């Protein structure tokens, strides 16, 4: 990663301006710019959290700098010239960017709870939001509000549940304290396991899968609501053209859903036999009389580029008489052993017909109604690839099962040897452990990987 060094002569530069330069250097490739008002202006940040344009005043740069790969950079300040010098090291040589000051010509912050695309499970989704707020602290500290700043220690822990980095501590002290206050004392061993695990990715995947059990949703709600409140002063990013709203409203109304864009709900009874996958397991659902079906729309992209709507299609099977308010869209994302389900339908906003087709598929997925052959084909064209669905289940699911099965077998062998008065070492040597590990890993992981991949394609 490219590193920015700030000389003692420039150490007094404002924190947010130093952060902007750090962002520019770590982007590696020098961005496009336009000459304006005697300076050069460029887009520094453009993500789900912040859009920011900056201007280097009293600055001219040659076209040869465009697209250069930055290896390292250093900043100095000359009092005699009243100018900063940013020395950029590239493979082609050194470039010197001299400027009077840095101005933030446009800064817009977005509500991350509406702009961050849902992926994985509820805790992975929350970790992505936490990561983006932590990035604001690093690259645009002046954009953080008081509520975000107060949440930073907790958000730093949460983003570590998915973001594996050498500098992570994996302490989870605040998260553990909140869990204990809610009576989830059994989670301590889960947090401790991550800290000591050699392969962090597997331990973290196991942790977020456990936290995604429906019993832990109150803990998630407490954190998510605090984050949502911290984003309340920001506007959600929305597309200028709103014609898709009427199209989707009409489809949902026709299917019997209540509500208006972007949230819809319908309460109904299931029909026939339904087979659905949730957290790597297949569930058979029949005769559910209180199915809460929800659809939420998320917009991705911008007015000048590709535009997309992602439909979150959730279903919760509640006890008779339980109100629909008991199950929001994120309730459907938790592991409730087949009593809550969530899928996504992605729609490229190429035409009104395409939006209408995707909205109908989304409604039927939330209702758990079989799709037509044409709708299935449409879904397959946008579905995850077979390998992207198969490999995580094969590697993680097969690995967990194989390790657990082998450990149980080991314990049984030791107990049997001791009971028979035989040498434990000889018993252990006679068992083909490598074969057992590979057979159970490939057998279970392969079968579940295929089932998951086919289910996702379906």
Image (tube, rainbow, N blue to C red):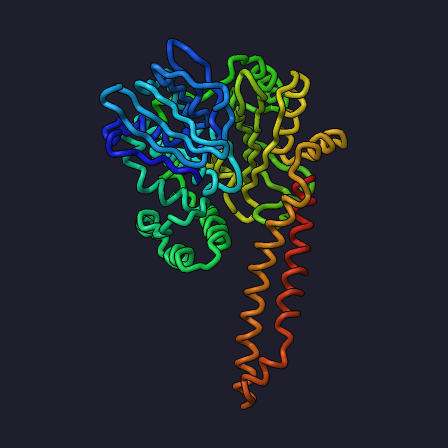
Picture coordinates of residue 276, whole percent (x, y):
64, 44
Picture coordinates of residue 283, whole percent (x, y):
62, 48
Outermost residue, right side: 373
Picture coordinates of residue 292, whole percent (x, y):
54, 34
Seen from the viewer's position, the closer of residues 174 and 195 is 195
Q: Is residue 230 visible?
A: no
The residue that appears at 56% across and 38% down in the rendered structure is 342
Q: Specify the quadrant of the image occupied by residue 163.
A: top left
Image height check: is 346 above or below 393? above
Picture coordinates of residue 138, whole percent (x, y):
35, 34
Q: Quadrant of the N terminus?
A: top left
Seen from the viewer's position, the closer of residues 62 and 13 is 62
Q: Specify the quadrant of the image occupied by residue 424.
A: bottom right
Count of numbered circles on the image? 0
For residue 366, side relative to residue 173 (left or right): right
Q: Is residue 36 visible?
A: yes
Outermost residue, top side: 37
């Amino acid at each position: 990663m490219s590193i920015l060094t700030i000389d003692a002569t420039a150490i007094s530069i404002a924190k947010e301006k130093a952060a902007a330069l750090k962002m520019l250097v770590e982007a590696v490739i020098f961005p496009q710019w336009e000459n304006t008002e005697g300076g050069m202006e460029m887009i520094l940040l453009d993500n789900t959290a912040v859009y920011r344009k900056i201007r280097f005043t009293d600055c001219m740069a040659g076209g040869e700098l465009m697209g250069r790969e930055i290896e390292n950079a250093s900043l100095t300040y000359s009092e005699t010239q009243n100018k900063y010098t940013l020395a950029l090291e590239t493979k082609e040589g050194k470039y010197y960017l001299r400027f009077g000051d840095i101005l933030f010509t446009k800064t817009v912050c977005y509500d991350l709870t509406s702009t961050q695309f849902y992926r994985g499970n509820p805790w992975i989704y929350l970790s992505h939001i936490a990561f983006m707020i932590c990035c604001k602290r690093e690259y645009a500290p002046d954009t953080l509000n008081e509520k975000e700043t107060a949440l930073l220690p907790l958000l730093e822990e949460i983003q570590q549940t998915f973001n594996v980095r050498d500098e992570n501590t994996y302490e989870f002290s605040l998260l553990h304290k909140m869990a204990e206050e809610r009576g989830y004392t059994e989670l301590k061993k889960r947090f401790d396991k991550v800290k000591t695990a050699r392969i962090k990715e597997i331990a973290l995947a196991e942790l977020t899968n456990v936290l995604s059990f429906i019993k832990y949703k109150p803990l998630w709600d407490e954190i998510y609501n605090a984050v949502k409140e911290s984003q309340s002063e920001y506007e959600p990013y929305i597309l200028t053209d709103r014609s898709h709203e009427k199209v989707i409203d009409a489809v949902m109304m026709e299917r019997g859903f209540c509500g208006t864009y972007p949230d819809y709900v319908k309460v109904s009874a299931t029909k026939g036999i339904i087979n659905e996958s949730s957290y790597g397991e297949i569930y058979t659902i029949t005769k559910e009389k209180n199915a809460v079906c929800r659809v939420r729309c998320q917009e991705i992209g911008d007015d000048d580029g590709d535009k997309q709507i992602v439909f979150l299609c959730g279903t919760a099977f509640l006890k008779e008489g339980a109100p629909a308010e008991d199950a929001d869209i994120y309730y459907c994302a938790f592991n409730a052993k087949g009593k809550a389900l969530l899928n996504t339908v992605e729609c490229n906003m190429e035409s009104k017909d395409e939006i209408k087709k995707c909205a109908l598929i989304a409604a039927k997925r939330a209702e758990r109604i079989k799709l037509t052959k044409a709708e299935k084909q449409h879904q397959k064209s946008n579905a995850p690839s077979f390998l992207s669905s198969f490999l995580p289940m094969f590697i993680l699911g097969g690995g967990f099962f194989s390790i657990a099965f082998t450990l149980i077998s080991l314990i049984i062998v030791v107990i049997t040897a001791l009971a028979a008065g035989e040498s434990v070492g000889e018993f252990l040597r006679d068992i083909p452990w490598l074969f057992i590990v590979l057979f159970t890993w490939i057998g279970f992981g392969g079968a579940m990987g295929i089932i998951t991949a086919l289910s996702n394609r379906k």
